[in-house]
Amino acid sequence: MTWLTENPLPVLLIGSLTAIILAGGWLQTGSRWLLAAIFAAIALTIGAVLAERLIVTDREQVTQTLFDIAALVERNQVNEALEYAYPGTPAVRSQAAAELPLYRFSEVNIKSNLEVRVSPERHPPTAVAEFNVVVVLSTRDGLLAHRRIPRYLEVTFLQDDDGQWRVGAYEHFDPRRGFTVDPDDPRGEYDDR
């Protein structure tokens, strides 16, 4: 049922079509109950769109957290980005603290193949985000300057006790891994860690 709470388009489409069909019937018959049904369809559509905007699903929270982290990395705010590490997994904080300071980021662009799978039944609840990203970076030692680097990332999020999603693990791979459609396709097996 998340399609209803994550995308207003189906509700708008169904509500609009219903109102148009009812309006056509009302124009032909002039029936008062059809006029009332038109207003009811419009009110229900508006209510459903408002509910969609107000309800924030776990998937939307994870996606927003991911974009917040990307914005911090792009601004080279490493310490602030490290705050998103899950407290129960100190290794991820150490990994990011070792990697991120090596670079000066000027762009972090999460691509449209972002997929988020949430497992609320686990303890703690987990989510896995998989996506391609392109970063533009320079190394602190000056060996690379404004280099465009594409990568494929798998980020595991864990929900902490206050409901916030935090990074529990992450790995990056050859970007071609994100281009495969079939998970059983051997072309998705690129691993250049």
Image (spheres, rainbow, N blue to C red):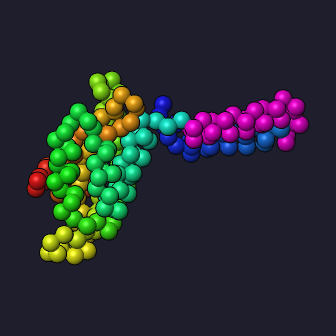
**Mainly helix, strand or loop, the magenta region?**
helix
In the displayed structure, 107 sits above or below 154; it is below
Q: Residue furthest left?
A: 192
Say whether residue 103 is visible: yes
Point out the stretch of residues depicted in magenta.
27-54
Residue 25, horizontal then vertical, whole percent: 80, 38
Q: Is residue 146 left or right of residue 120?
A: left
Q: Nearer the viewer, residue 107 or 21?
A: 107
Q: Image quarter for residue 45?
A: top right
Could one spot residue 176 in this view of the protein? no
Residue 20 is situated, as x and y percent measured from the top left of the image, at 73, 43
Farthest front residue? Answer: 79
Q: How many marks?
A: 0
Residue 161: horizontal and vertical position, in percent? Answer: 36, 28
Residue lying at 38% horizontally and 41% vertically, measured from the top left? 62
Name the residue: 30% across, 34% down. Answer: 158
Examine the structure image and report whether residue 70 is included in the region drawn in magenta.
no
Q: Relative to residue 32, is residue 9 depicted above or below?
A: below
Q: Quadrant of residue 118?
A: top left
Please provide percent x and percent y for residue 19. 73, 40
Residue 39: within the magenta? yes
